[in-house]
Amino acid sequence: MSKSNKPKKKAGQQKQTKRTKREPDTGTLKGRLDVTRSGRGFVIVEGLEEDIMIAPDGLKDAMDGDTVRVKLSGGYEGRPKGKVTEVVQRKKKRVYRQSANE
């Protein structure tokens, strides 16, 4: 009998390809955030089959187009779900606000 050299997949582990950018020391994934009009976000991770859904309360201070780190926290309707842990790089350099008094 010969043993297989393939590592066994743990229950609940995400499908990954060689190009998935999982950060080994933090257990997070790095990708680009896409925010919808409803306020829900989706992180697009290179090499991951499905985008990671982020609820509005899990976006932290991240904005559309930012590069973020995400920690997985389960699933929602068959899609991986997570929370933003860090904004790695901002897409926009400046944010303009309009005062309520104007």
Image (cartoon, rainbow, N blue to C red):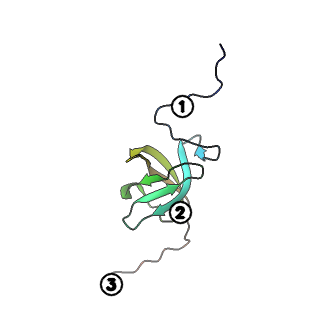
Which one is nearer the viewer's eye here, 5 or 93? Answer: 5
> Which is more N-terminal, label 3 or label 1?
1
Mark 2 → mark 1, Cα distance in angstroms:
31 Å
Q: Mark 1 points at which residue?
A: 9
Q: Which amino acid does label 3 sit on?
A: Asn
Question: Is the residue under label 3 in contact with that under label 2 (CB below 8 Å)?
Answer: no
* 76 left or right, relative to 87: left
Q: Label 2 neighbourhood size at 10 Å, few (<14), some (14-19), many (20+)?
A: some
Quarter occupied by the N terminus: top right
Q: Mark 2 points at which residue?
A: 66
Question: Is the residue under label 1 in contact with that under label 2 (CB below 8 Å)?
Answer: no
Which one is nearer the viewer's eye here, 47 or 22? Answer: 47
Q: Residue at 50% across / 37% down in the picture? A: 13
Residue 92: name its quadrant.
Answer: bottom right
**Is 46 situated above or below 63?**
above
Q: Which amino acid does label 2 sit on?
A: Asp
